[in-house]
Amino acid sequence: MEFGEGSPAGIYEGVPACEYHKTKHTSHSKVKPLVRHETPEHYKHALDNPITPTTDMMMGTATHTLILEPHLFDETVETGPTATRRSKSWKERQAEVPDKILLTEGETHAVEGMAARIHEEPELVALMKMAGNVFEPTVRWDYTADSGTVIECKSRPDLWLRSPEVLLDLKTTDSVDDYTFGKRMLDLCYFSQGAMYQHAMGELGYKIRDVLILAIERKPPYVLDLIRIDTETLDLGWRRVRAALEIVATCRERNSYPGNTIDLSNIRTVSVPYWAL
């Protein structure tokens, strides 16, 4: 089955990333502002103004491609002509290959280093290459809000391991230690992304026992770790996603995406977090 606008619910294999991102289905990245407790106005602005990928995001995508889909690496990633993105020749080359990720020589070296480090773990590589695994399945599913409004959703985990009923996502990071990566998991909403993946598969009748993150540091010696998101955290993540989807449904029904308003009779009081006191 081909994936596109109007595609019925189901799992689609082999969908190119560009085709996945083209459709207007609601994904985790689109509702992330609401998961973070930002306003519907933030959500609508993010929908209408897609972000420009950061260097970290581009390196993450390049690493993901080299590790999970190495046959596509040369088609999607290229080392830029100079050491800086500000040069004229860099901008000219990017204009010639707008769909490619351009990395500096140092960034390309880091991506290759991360991929090589993962291949030093034979048990991990064997797990990722098990027969029946599906790389980047496109999961089309529907969420029905309390009001009855149906939101057509999509999700795209990095790897679906069918036999152990596990989803795995690859993430690059500054550090894999518990505190630093735990904070990153919260700040970048990995916990709610994993919960949305799990729920999406469940909606289609596929049980997911674990959601794992393969985290790898961007700098030598490229320390890595395989991390399980615990049940309580996934439950919190789904509550956040569900609340976000309910807001999306309400906004669509009313055709209104409100932000904050100033009420001089009800001025909000804010204090520093309790842990800072």
Image (spheres, rainbow, N blue to C red):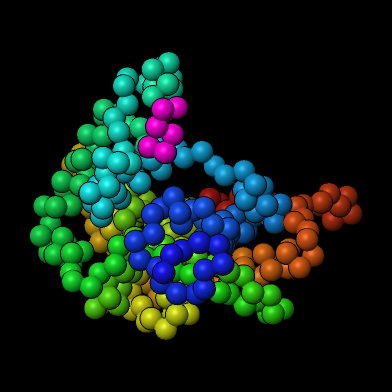
Q: What residue lies at 25% left-to-right and 61% top-to-bottom?
A: 226
Does the image show residue 32?
Answer: no
Residue 218 versus residue 201 in the image, above or below: above
Q: Left or right: 168 with respect to 267?
A: left
Q: Residue furthest top?
A: 88
Which residue shows up at 66% across the image and 70% down it? 246
Image mark count: 0
- Image quadrant of residue 157? bottom left
Q: Please identify the quarter of the rendering in which residue 129 is found.
A: bottom left
Can you say which quadrant of the picture contains the N terminus? bottom left
Queried whether the magenta region covers residue 97, the answer comes back as yes
Q: Is residue 64 visible?
A: yes
Residue ID at (65%, 53%): 43
Residue depicted at x 25% and y 55%: 68
In the image, is residue 255 above or below residue 224?
A: below
Horizontal relation, residue 62 to residue 156: left or right = left
The magenta segment: 94-100
User: Is residue 33 rendered to the left or right of residue 198?
Assistant: right
Camera-side residue of 145 and 7? 7
Residue 245 percent coordinates (x, y): 62, 68
Along the viewing direction, whichever of 63 and 175 lies nearer the viewer? 63
Residue 244 highlighted magenta (yes or no): no
Return the x and y of residue 265 as percentages of the image width and height.
Answer: 89, 54
- Relative to 2, residue 219 above or below: above
* Residue at the extreme front of the image, as rendered: 1
Question: Percent position (x, y) of residue 121?
Answer: 12, 57
- Residue positioned most to the right: 265
User: Which residue is at the front of the view, 85 or 93?
Assistant: 93
Picture coordinates of residue 113, whole percent (x, y): 19, 41
